[in-house]
Structure formats: C-alpha cells, structure tokens
Amino acid sequence: MAAQFDLRRDAAGWAVFDRWTGKTVIVERVLQEGLTWEEASDVVRRLQSRSDDGDRRILQ
C-alpha cells in the first residue's frame, strides 16, 4: 500500500503530514511539527502501521 504519511522540513525541524490532504498531522490535539528527524520518523512509522492495518480513525 502506498504511504499515506511523510515528513517535510519546517521552520523548527520536521513536520509529519498526510500525503492525501497535504496538511500537518494532529495527534492528541498537537500539531506534529517542529520535531527532530527521529521523532518525526517514529510518528510516520506508527501512523503508517495503523493505516496499513486498516485503522482509519482520525486521531485529532
């Protein structure tokens, strides 16, 4: 399955975004931006794993 989530640079580090909407991901009411590369990569890995398992819940 194609990756739904990806990383991009932002002013304060790295942001996680939804490739379908182009918007920054929100997890538990927190924008996933200004992260270290390691943090952002971990968020992408976790979100993609949930998506691949068929979990379509919105995590806002």
Image (cartoon, helix red, strand yellow):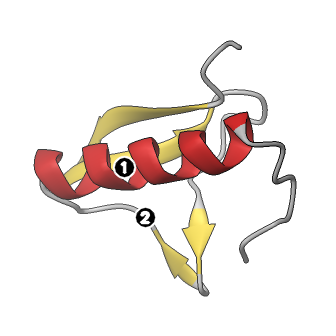
Quadrant where the N terminus sits is: top right
The residue singled out by tag 2 in the image is 32
Cα separation between marks 2 and 1: 6 Å
Q: Residue 34: x percent and y percent?
A: 24, 62
Q: Residues within 10 Å of mark 1 (few under 14, many from 20)?
A: many
Q: Along the horizontal axis of the image, is 56 left or right of 19?
A: right
Q: Looking at numbered disc 2 in the image, what kind of residue is underneath it?
A: Gln
Against 46, residue 7 (above or below) is above
Q: Residue 3: x percent and y percent?
A: 60, 21
Against 41, residue 7 (above or below) is above
Q: Is residue 1 visible?
A: yes
Which residue shows up at 72% across the image and 72% down it? 59
Answer with the quarter of the image where residue 57 lies.
bottom right
Q: Residues within 10 Å of mark 2 (few under 14, many from 20)?
A: many
Against 10, residue 30 (above or below) is below
- Residue furthest to the top in view is 2
Q: Residue 40: x percent and y percent?
A: 29, 51
In the rendered structure, which disc, 2 or 1, sits on the residue that comes first in sequence? Answer: 1
Identify the mark at residue 36; answer none if there is no mark. none
- Residue furthest to the front in view is 53
Q: Residue 54: x percent and y percent?
A: 83, 43
The residue singled out by tag 1 in the image is 15
Q: Are marks 2 and 1 in contact (CB under 8 Å)?
A: yes
Which residue shows up at 59% across the image and 57% down it? 25
Q: Secondary structure at mark 1?
A: strand
Quadrant where the C terminus sits is: bottom right
Answer with the quarter of the image where residue 19 lies.
top right
Q: Looking at numbered disc 1 in the image, what kind of residue is underneath it?
A: Ala
Q: Is residue 12 visible?
A: no
